[in-house]
Structures are given as structure tokens and as C-alpha cells.
Image (cartoon, helix red, strand yellow):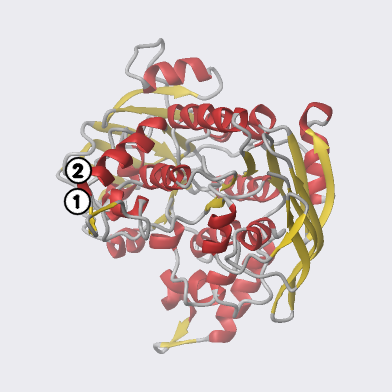
Amino acid sequence: MQINMRGISKAFGPVKVLESVDLSLAAGEIHALMGENGAGKSTLMKILCGVYQADAGEILVDGSVVNIRSTTDAEHLGIAIIHQELNLIPQLSVMENLFLGREPRRFGVIDTATMRKQAHTYLDLLGAGHIDTDMEAGQLSIGQQQMVEIAKALSLNAQVLVMDEPTAALTDREIESLFKIMLDLKSRGVAIVYVSHRMEEIFRICDKISVLRDGQFVGEREIAKTGFDEVVRLMVGREIGDRFPKRSAKVGDVRLQVSNLADTGNIADINFEVRAGEVLGIAGLMGAGRSEILKTLFGINRQTSGEVRLDGQTLHICNASDAIGAGIGFVTEDRKAQGLVLGMSVRENATLVHLDHFAKLGVVSERAESAAVADLIKQLSIRTRDAELDVKSLSGGNQQKVVFAKWLAVPPKVLLLDEPTRGVDVGGKAEIYHIINQLAAAGVAIVMVSSELPEVMAMSDRILVMHQGRQNGIFDATSATQESIMTAATGGQTSPLTAAIPA
């Protein structure tokens, strides 16, 4: 199937999101679509898939103009999308989500046994057969939910498949399984649009790349004939410089001390210290307990044993309010469900956890809020019409920056970061890396979970590796290798497994 999008324009109120954008997609092609957050990538794909309708322009399928006014229209044409923001219904089971509206029936009644069997078939294709098809989708991890979304798209037997950040929450093993499926689909003539901020993936799996900047098409390149620097220049219109900025923070005294930490069955025997100005990275496979450490420290998961000390004082954290009061901040992995109130404005979200800081005699000063948030918007380069715009109107990457802004309004003593650059473009990542370094330079102790090994190795002073709920060593980031970290993450032993705390 050949797709041609010509002169596509779209505006939301006075804000022009797309201006006369062209995109061509051939059968059996994996085509990357890139651009900074807010460049219009997701909007363009939602127009192709019937979520939005263009204000101007046309879509041709095999040379004929088509009207795609709904997702059902798109599916009938053989076009499916895997959205960046997960769209599963939490209360329904995995198999019910997979076949919602398309349930197999027998004598007019939903055939549950067939539906379960077919669900297993598509999950097995992705190496995710361990997922319980009868479990409610809301009980799955973010990565597992992503695999269900991908399996749902595969079940449609689409001829054009749009993947919007499909690997953002997947393990390396799951990503390898996905890439095998993509190459198989490509060999069968399926066209794939691949939206991602992960450059390594783009250059590994894609054939062509199209770049959007500020809602406009700026170029198409063959992957074999371009390079990282050229793509970045197309995306941002400027040089980014070093991908990971050099760290120069002076490490101070021990700020956070964790001894024999355990929660209700996810983690046990966790021991580490983090000094003021230090970044401790946490690596490991999905499900190893990385995020659970942060959730326990922040009071989301119940601590069942162990001791946590901050600046020498023992903490008794029962909930998030206790953690915030003690000076601990948390940038959550799941911004949509846990990090933001989508119906509130950028200003309200950015100041939500520290309203007392902006209040006098119990009354919140909007003027003080607005001044602080204006600085944060500039500092983090958040693309928004103004601070009063609902945060749900922002792109995924800009929403993530608002989550980050919550903890910059009043910098904490300890900042817990769970996948802080998930869904953030290359330019936005560089900005967040600089913010992390600035916070460390100001004496904040930082604990960062990341699924991207290059990121965790470049941004950390030391790296704690998790395996099946327990730590399997702490490495000095300057001497650690990806091989040694992955060996520890899969349960193997490497030497040295313990790194000294920086002096």
C-alpha cells in the first residue's frame, strides 16, 4: 500500500500545529518520523489514522484520494496506530482490550475461549506470552501495557502500522522481539511509520526518515545516506553539542542512606548511600525492582523493613506527603496517571506540590505562581501557548517537562527520577540533562532509574544494578561497561561488583 499525505494543515484554535506538510510512505518500508516535542508528529499521525481531521490537504491511498473521518475508517483501509499514551481500558481484561469491538462470537455470544487463544497467539509473537490474558489491564506494568497495545495493532492485520514511541517502556529483550516482528511485517509488504526519539533505534531499524520542525516538513533522508548530526540539525535547526554534557558537580556529605530496605514483596535487602551532588543510577531489566525502590522511598509502596536516613535523621515515610515534607521529590515514569492532573493548567500542575510556598495567610498568590512558572517554562523550554493552557493539550514530551517543573519550583534535598527522559526528544533530553547537572551542582542528591544504558552510564557517578528484586552490585560509572552491567542485570557476577562512594 502506498500512502501520500499532501499539504496537510491543522490548527487548534489560533495555534497552528501543522502547515502544508507532505509525507510519502511505501509498502515494505520502515519510515522514521522525527522532530522535537510539539513539532506535530503525533498530530500528523492522528490525522492519518482518523483521530483528527485535517483543515487542509489530502490523503491518497494507492493514488486515490480517501476521506478518513474516524479510526474505523482508517482500520477499514488497513491503517492502525499504536499511540504514545496508552489507551487501554484499565477495568477490562487483557484479551477484552485486545479485541474490543471485534470480539469473536459463536452463535451470537462472545467466544471467550477463542478470544483467549487468539490473545495468546499475538502476545506470543512479541515474546510476551507470560502476560495473563484474564488480568485487568490496569494491573499490568507500563511496559506490559505497551506490549498489549502492540499486540492489539498486530491483531488488526494492518497494511500500514503507525508506531508512536513503541519502545519507550520496553526492556531490551522486548525491543528485540518487536524489531523481529517489524522486519517480518516489512518482508510481507507492511508499511511502518516509526515515531521515536531514540536515535540508535532509528538508524538500526528504519529505511528512511522524515523530519518535522515547528509544524513544517523540513526534509526526507535515506538512513544509509545520513548521520546523527544531520538529523539533529534538521530537527532543532541548531547544533546540540555533546549528547551527554560533562558533569562537574562536587560530591559532598552523605545525604540519603538506605539500609536493608524492603517492601511488600517486590524488593528486599537494598543498601546504598547517595551524597549531596551525586547521581546514583539504577539499572536492570524491567520487573527487576528499579521503580519499586523509588516508590518505596516516596511512600507509594509500603516499607516493610529497613531504615532510610536523610542528612543523618531517620525517616518514617508512610505516604507521598511525608516524603515531600522531608524534602524528597519524585519524577514519576507514568506522567499521565501519576505525574499530572490533565484537566489543570501548566501553572497549576507546576506549583501543585508546593502551594504553601506561594501562599500568604493561607491564600495562594497567582502572581507569585505565574512568575515562578514563567521562569520554569523558559528554563525547560516547555512549548505552550501560555501557562494557563491545560496540560492535556501539550505534547507528551512537554507534559514530561511539566512533571519535572513541579520539583524545580522548590528544589528538594533528594530527587528521585523514574525514566526522566521517556518520550522526550533529543533537544529536550539535552535540556533535562543540564537541569540534572545543575541540581547536582546545587547539592541535590539524585537517584535515577533509566532503561537507556548509555543515559544511565553517562549521567551517573555510580550505578546500582537490580536483578529479581535485589541489588546485584554497585558500579563506578567511569569504569563500568554495558556488558558488565547487563551481566549483573541478568543475574551473573562481574568484578568489581562494589564501587566505593566518591570522596
Which secondary structure, mark 2? loop
What is the quadrant of the N terminus in the image? top right
**Dot 2: within a 10 Å radius of its alpha carbon, few (fewer than 14), some, or many (20 or more) residues?**
many
- Give 39 or 463, whichever is nearer the viewer: 39
Q: Is residue 480 visible?
A: no
- Give 405 or 441, whichever is nearer the viewer: 405
At which x and y percent is residue 248? 63, 36
Above or below 161: residue 289:
above
Which secondary structure, mark 1? loop
User: Which amino acid lies under the numbered mark 2 shown in the image of this protein?
Assistant: Asp
Above or below 296: residue 388:
below
User: Which amino acid lies under the numbered mark 1 shown in the image of this protein?
Assistant: Arg
**Dot 1: within a 10 Å radius of its alpha carbon, few (fewer than 14), some, or many (20 or more) residues?**
some
Which residue corresponds to mark 1?
Answer: 302
- Give 221 or 186, whichever is nearer the viewer: 186
Q: Is residue 60 left or right of residue 496?
A: right
At which x and y percent is residue 290? 35, 38
Above or below 19: residue 35:
above
Who's the residue at 41% across and 10% down the image? Answer: 495
Which residue corresponds to mark 2?
Answer: 263
Who's the residue at 69% across and 81% down the image? Answer: 13
Who's the residue at 59% across and 80% down the image? Answer: 388
At which x and y percent is residue 372? 60, 73
Q: Is residue 420 left or right of residue 162?
A: left
Would you say the residues marked 2 and 1 are in contact, meaning their CB atoms lie under 8 Å apart?
yes
- The answer to which of marks 2 and 1 sits earlier in the sequence is 2
